[in-house]
Image (cartoon, rainbow, N blue to C red):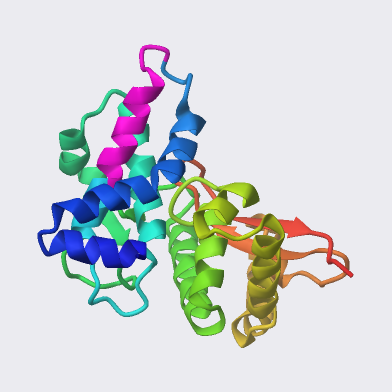
Amino acid sequence: MSNEELVQLYQNGDKKALEKLMQANTGIIHKIANKYNGINRELEFDDLFQSGVLGLIAAAKKYKFDIENKAKFITYAVHYINRYINSCVNGKTSKDIENNKFYHQCTSLNKPTGEDEEIEVGDSVAYVDYGFENIEEKLFLNKLREDLEEVMQQKNTLMQREILKFKYGWNTTPMKLDDIADIFGITRDKVRNIESNALRKLRNSSWAMSRIKEFAELGYIDKFHLGIFRNWGDRCIDIMHLQKCKRIFYIEKEKLCG
């Protein structure tokens, strides 16, 4: 039974479905908790793991099935698990997470960007003050992210989008290929191939091609490291990702294969 089927049963009142969901995702919670192990020496690993379980349960309660282009449950859940464990490390309770105003300024991971309906706690990425020089730059980068999200919806499959977002930390911390492979139950090489195909579609999109001149004239290509808009040569875009703890969009660059 899939995660989504178990979540739906749980939301309909089947408590045993939650137990099965927790058992099915124990490995993922363990991997995420292990990343935080040792940061706060007052915490045992079990404390981190239990916080991750609470994050999974919160995700199961809030996951919506009536949203077009919704993320897979595991993508939604990983973000919650990270949030709850990170908050545990920083001495916050689950109630603190719910009450934190930061999360109410966010754009939901489980719904299309820009909707005004209920904003879920912990399933989002905030558009807050990143310390850029002026408001125009902040607006530019926010719009750039929105545009890329739209292009990904048009050009990439759901699996491709999920893998790109996990790999480059779109809504959570960046993940290694091995960890992504474990989440989807596929090989590391398969993850890499899906990633490469997804990036190729983005590089060749009319959106990328049409923005080269505009961004070059604005001087944004070098200023914001937008490798997608440089001459292809031996370097290419991986993908933009926004990390809340940093102050800029990054474009990873790698040598073209073959």
Judge whether residue 68 can be spotted in this image: yes
Residue at 71 percent of width and 71 percent of height: 229
**Residue 49, magenta (yes or no):** yes
x, y percent for residue 33: 43, 33
x, y percent for residue 230: 76, 69
- Pick the quarter of the image with the C terminus: bottom right
Residue at 28 percent of width and 23 percent of height: 91
Give the image quarter of residue 191. Answer: bottom right
Question: Is residue 146 shown left or right of residue 188?
Answer: left
Residue most toward the left? Answer: 13
The majority secondary structure of the magenta stretch comes to: helix
Question: Is residue 252 shown left or right of residue 85?
Answer: right
Question: Is residue 212 shown left or right of residue 78?
Answer: right
x, y percent for residue 1: 35, 65
Foreground: 35 or 170? 35
Q: Over which residues does the magenta segment extend?
A: 41-56
Foreground: 24 or 59? 24
Q: How many marks?
A: 0
**Residue 101, magenta (yes or no):** no
Residue at 34 percent of width and 41 percent of height: 83
Foreground: 183 or 217? 183
x, y percent for residue 26: 40, 42
Judge whether residue 121 can be spotted in this image: no
Q: Please determine whether, in this image, residue 139 is positioned above or below residue 34.
A: below
Residue at 29 percent of width and 43 percent of height: 55
